[in-house]
Amino acid sequence: MESRSSTSLVSSLLLSLLLVLPSLPSLTLSASSFRCNTHDYNTLLGIKKALNNPYDIIAWLPNVDCCDWPGITCDENTNRVTQFDISHSNLSAEIPPAVGNLTYLQYLTFHKNPGLHGSIPSTITKLVHLKFLRFSWDGLSGPIPEFLGQLKNLEYLNLDFNQFSGSIPDSLGYLPKLSALFLDRNKLSGPIPYSFGGFKTSDFYLILSHNQLSGEIPCSLGAVDLTKIDLSHNQLVGDASTLFVPNGNLQTIDLSRNKFDFVLSGVKFPKTLIYLDLSHNHIHGSIPKEIIKLELQTLNVTYNGLCGRIPYGKNMKRFDYDSFFHNPCLCGKPLPSCK
């Protein structure tokens, strides 16, 4: 009887243990429990090694699911890596060509990594799903490659604050879905490509300031539905009046510190305009009276060849001397009265 009781007690204990075990947390994370795709996981570890294992991504640990690594996002359904972001890092390396093996990427960012140098690898042309590409505030150099024009799903391209040189490739103008292009603060030269008149998306942002661009603005650019355009601090010449489309959606235009030479008198401003900087050019004629109807928040026409009475009234009352000075015969409030 005693033996049977002991056996019954052991059986009960074993049954209780089996019931409890499924609720206990796993003590180890096996590779089979990772959400992250194995190919993407191995690719990311290779990228980390190629970047010389910077301290900033020390949390990319082999025994942690890569979908949980900082800067990495996976698709909830496919578990493929769709977002890659390394920003504010102390890394010192080039962009690893293996980035192109993350073939499901939609967003790719290297931002504010001053130790990131070299050129853009051609392998990123394999990223056929890429919508967002940002290599900004880094130390990249060389020409902007033509092969970026192969990224047909690209909607946003930002290469500002680098050391890129040479001309802007025509191929960028043939990106069918592009709606924002930032190439400012580089060492780019040559003209604005004529192909840029082919941008088809609405509310386009085109930022090319602080380069060494020269030549005239292609007339085709006037057909683009621009919301913001900044061409300031270049060496551009000729007539920029084609950018002012009366029925357009332009809100911000900065043409300052170039060599533009056209008559302002006949320009028809879009009603949406809130920021206008034409300073430091060779623009002449008078300021159109219709400017009074605009809800301008910023206005600067200094250092030009403008003449005539400054339109005064409504929203124009907010602008003082600093918006108009250094024009040879511009007069009226807030400048000295006209004779």
Image: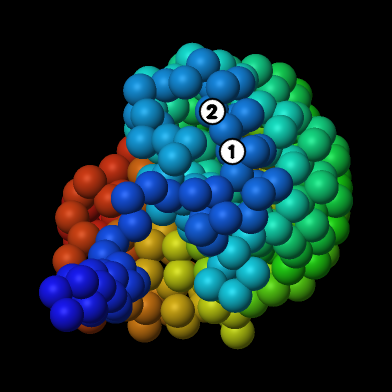
Q: x and y percent of residue 95 in the render?
A: 63, 27
Q: Quadrant of residue 214?
A: top right
Residue found at the far left of this picture:
2
Q: Is residue 76 left or right of residue 339?
A: right
- Front-lying residue, 194 or 255: 194
> Does residue 277 show up?
no
> Does residue 11 show up?
yes
Q: Is residue 210 left or right of residue 323?
A: right
**Which residue lies under the disc numbered 1?**
44
* Label 2: how many Cα within 10 Å (few below 14, some 14–19, many 20+): some
Rendered view: 98 above or below 116: below
In the image, what residue occupies the spot 85% across and 51% down? 150
Q: x and y percent of residue 120 in the render?
A: 70, 30
Amino acid type assigned to the residue bearing label 1 in the image: Leu
Q: Quadrant of residue 223?
A: bottom right
Amino acid type assigned to the residue bearing label 2 in the image: Lys
- Front-lying residue, 175 or 81: 81
In the image, what residue occupies the spot 34% across and 57% down? 26
Q: x and y percent of residue 47 in the render?
A: 60, 30
Q: How far apart are marks 1 and 2 (CA)?
A: 6 Å
Q: Regarding mark 1 in the picture, which secondary structure is present there?
A: helix
In the image, what residue occupies the spot 63% across and 60% down? 80
Q: Regarding mark 2 in the picture, which secondary structure is present there?
A: helix
* Label 1: how many Cα within 10 Å (few below 14, some 14–19, many 20+): many
Q: x and y percent of residue 157 in the render?
A: 62, 51
Residues under numbered marks 1 and 2 in contact, where contact means CB atoms less than 8 Å apart: yes
Rendered view: 240 above or below 212: below
Give the quadrant of the N terminus.
Answer: bottom left
Q: Residue 48 carries which label?
A: 2
- Front-lying residue, 228 or 318: 228
- Front-lying residue, 72 or 335: 72
